[in-house]
Amino acid sequence: MNETAVMTDPIPVRHLFETHMTVSDLQRSIGFYRDVVGLKLAFEASERNVAFLWIGESGRSMLGLWSLGTAPLGLILHLAFDVALDDLLEAPKRLKTQGIKPLSFFGVESTEPSVISWMPAASVYFRDPDGHMLEYLSMLDKEPRPHLGIIPWSEWLDQNKS
């Protein structure tokens, strides 16, 4: 297979990793999804009015709850697809080859993944033709480092040398 064919082939998706929704009362919704549905609270950022809950086993699938008006990146709908790390690292280049702008967590064009250090996971974002925010995500085999926040892949590598 030639390099051009590989660069235009879709990234292999393993499964749906996450979905997000807006809620009118964050604490009430956390309680509902934790106590009624049985999800485990993964992370809450009260200053941003957002919470994330693991669906099933930690690190496999997640639900994000955002208080009305707090969703990032002009959230219309957001889906994250679990992909292999090697594919994720190639995603920015492959998306650009297909005429799609790869984005960082903060919604700016990027040539590398963003790392969400509290999980930790690496992600590349992009929009579908209707403007929905899509994400390729790969969980990282490292200890969470929430104090690092959300950083570029190259910075994550620098922080994890040893």
Image (cartoon, grey):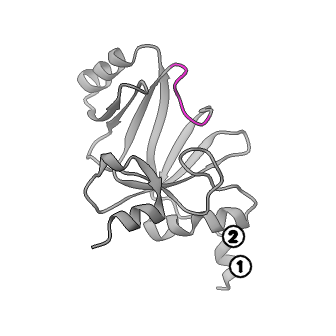
| Secondary structure state at the residue bearing disc 1 | helix
In this orientation, which residue lies closer to the viewer: 146 or 40? 146
**In this picture, is 58 found above or below 31?**
below
Counting from the top left corner in percent of width and height, residue 122 is at 44, 57
- In the image: residue 8, left or right of residue 136: right
- Is residue 118 visible in the rendered image? The answer is no
The quadrant of the rendering that contains the N terminus is bottom right
Disc 2 and disc 1 in contact, CB within 8 angstroms = yes
Tell me the kind of residue under disc 1.
Thr
**Residue at the spot x=52%, y=59% of the render?**
113
Q: Position of residue 46 (x, y in %)?
A: 36, 25
- What's the residue at 73%, 45% (across, down)? 129
- Please tell me whether residue 69 belongs to the stretch shown in magenta: yes
Q: Describe residue 160's horizontal placement relative to residue 2 as left or right.
A: left
Numbered badge on residue 8: 2
Q: Nearer the viewer, residue 35 or 105?
A: 105
Alpha carbon separation for disc pair 2 and 1:
6 Å
Query: How many marks overall?
Result: 2
Residue under the point 31% across and 19% down = 32
How far from the left and from the top, in percent, is residue 7?
66, 73
Q: Quadrant of the C terminus?
A: bottom left
Magenta highlight on residue 110: no
Q: Is residue 32 left or right of residue 153?
A: left
From this viewpoint, which residue is outermost toward the bottom? 2
- Residue 149 position, x and y percent, is 39, 46
Question: Of helix, strand and loop, which one carries label 2?
Answer: helix
Main SS category, magenta section = loop
- The span picked out in magenta is 68-73
The vertical placement of 76 against 144, above or below, is above
Residue corresponding to mark 1: 4
The amino acid type, in three-letter code, at marker 2 is Thr
**Residue 43 drawn above or below residue 153:** above
